[in-house]
Image: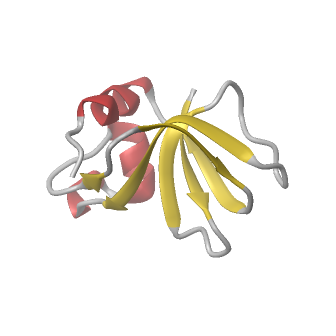
């Protein structure tokens, strides 16, 4: 399952990665094949639009790393297969 994870104390670090199952509130999350969203274009339709349709326009996403962990996180969103495929093809900034 590919998810968007809003991490950090205020949820401002927006990460995308793979998890074996839905995260459990209050527990750390390890993302595999992780990328960070630096900016999403208005054409995405917000964070949920990014999760539903994938990146659009001038969206900026970093290169992929094998794995990262996050302690405090605020929200997670499951990405649609369409959005996950689009993120996998999106060039790193």
Q: Is residue 5 shown left or right of residue 47?
A: right
72 shown above or below 17:
below
How are the colours assigned in the image? secondary structure
Q: Quadrant of the N terminus?
A: top right
10 shown above or below 82:
below
Label total for image:
0
The one nearer the camera, 17 or 25, is: 17
69 shown above or below 81:
below
The one nearer the camera, 38 or 74, is: 38
65 shown above or below 7:
above
Image coordinates of residue 4 in percent, x first then y, are 52, 46
Which residue shows up at 63% across the image and 67% down it? Answer: 8
Image coordinates of residue 44 in percent, x first then y, are 28, 53
Which residue shows up at 45% across the image and 30% down it? Answer: 80
Report the residue that reaches farthest toward the front: 66
Image coordinates of residue 74 in percent, x first then y, are 68, 62
Instruction: Identify the image quadrant of residue 32.
Output: top right
Report the residue that reaches farthest toward the left: 57
Instruction: Identify the image quadrant of residue 89.
Output: top left
Which residue shows up at 57% across the image and 59% down it? Answer: 6
């Amino acid at each position: 399952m590919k998810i968007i994870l809003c991490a950090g104390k205020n949820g401002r670090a927006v990460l995308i990665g793979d998890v074996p199952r839905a995260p459990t509130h209050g527990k750390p999350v390890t993302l595999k094949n992780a990328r960070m969203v630096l900016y999403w274009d208005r054409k995405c339709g917000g964070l949920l639009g990014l999760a539903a349709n994938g990146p659009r326009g001038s969206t900026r996403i970093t290169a992929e790393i094998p794995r990262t962990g996050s302690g405090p996180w605020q929200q997670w969103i499951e990405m649609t297969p369409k959005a996950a495929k689009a993120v996998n093809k999106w060039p790193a900034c």
